[in-house]
Amino acid sequence: MNAVSTSPVPAPPARLEAVGVTVRFGGLVALNKVDLRIPPGSMVGLVGPNGAGKSTLFAVLSGLLRPNEGRVLMGGGDVTRATPQARARRGLSRTFQRPELFSGLTVREHLVLGDRVRHSGDRIWRDLLTGGGFRRPSKEEDERVDRLLEALHLGGLQHREAAGLSLGAGRLVEVARALAVEPEVLLLDEPSSGLDMRETEELAATLRRVVEERGLSLLLVEHDVDLVLGMCDTVNVLDFGAMIRSGTPEEIRSDPAVRAAYLGEEPAPRDAEAKRDEEDA
Ligand SMILES: Nc1ncnc2c1ncn2[C@@H]1O[C@H](COP(=O)(O)OP(=O)(O)OP(=O)(O)O)[C@@H](O)[C@H]1O
């Protein structure tokens, strides 16, 4: 009888991964041997209280900060020493906490620029530097931008200048521009900051739809824990530079330490009772 191999099928490499990342600022350990995986087609959340190390990890993943120890991988390849531009060429895109839009350009023009970063490479800079200005978009560029405007429900604002947009609309434009680069993995830095509840819900619904339609992976770094628990497949919790929990929203929600520390809840009744018994004893 032939032996049947039962070796498990290896998991596909993560789109983006931090392995054993340590960052020190002088004597302060901002990140201590932190691991984080963003698998293909998944929505991953990163939460933690102020000063936990979220922005530092975001900077390490996006290439703005080199870790003292550990590695950053994209699709299994080591990009620890790669610049943000080199990571962008490998499929990484990001948004900023405060939308970084060009005030004189319309919404549509922002998306054309993003599209050109992806499809025209250096040409975009040559046009700007040699006074070529903003070339008329080609038919293909227009079609790709139309699809994106439709996906993010931004068609009604396409001819408005970025300067006059509300914060909520500005954030959507930033997300749309980041998507115009056709990334494999998108890092979102506090996307709900400054938005009201309705705008946050709309943004969450849009992100969910776009992830499903485009099959991209997403990392959401957020103060709004409910938003992260409501939309992500996996949630990672940082505390004082250590990754204390990674799991599904249900696992994170029901973890007593996480609940007590991050969701602002009292310890579970069972724990509270045990504590009272201890005090009585
Ligand atoms: N450039 C720096 N130099 C020195 N210390 C820094 C620097 N950047 C961050 N830190 C420190 O590193 C720790 C982690 O900071 P970080 O900004 O990554 O946390 P965070 O979770 O993003 O916080 P917040 O939610 O308030 O933005 C903090 O103690 C912070 O003061």
Image (cartoon, rainbow, N blue to C red):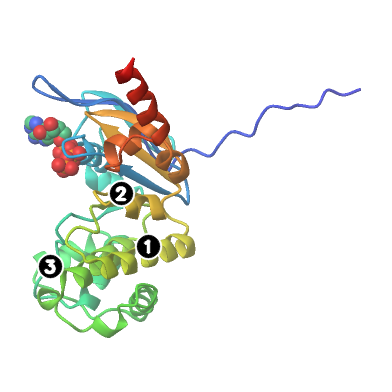
Q: How far apart are marks 3 and 1 (CA)?
A: 31 Å
Give 9 or 123, whichever is nearer the viewer: 9
Mark 2 CB near ligand 1 (8 Å cut): no
Q: In this view, which residue lies farthest toward the top?
A: 281
Rendering coords of residue 43 (x, y %): 41, 50
Q: Is mark 1 on a helix, strand or loop?
A: helix
Which amino acid is tagged 3? Leu
Q: What element carries label 3?
A: helix
Rendering coords of residue 255 (x, y %): 41, 35
Q: Which of marks 2 and 3 is in front?
A: 2
Q: In this view, which residue lies farthest toward the front?
A: 280
Give 24 or 185, whichever is nearer the viewer: 24
Residue 225's tag is: 2
Residue 66's tag is: none
Image quadrant in which you'd find residue 157: bottom left
Q: Which residue is drawn at 43% across and 55% down?
A: 216
Query: How many other residues sit within 10 Å of disc 3, few (<14), some (14-19) or many (≥20)?
Result: few
In the displayed structure, would residue 38 be above or below residue 120?
A: above
Mark 1 CB near ligand 1 (8 Å cut): no
Residue 207's tag is: 1
Q: Distance between the residues labelled 1 and 2?
A: 16 Å
Give 119 or 81, whichever is nearer the viewer: 81
Which residue is under mark 3? 128
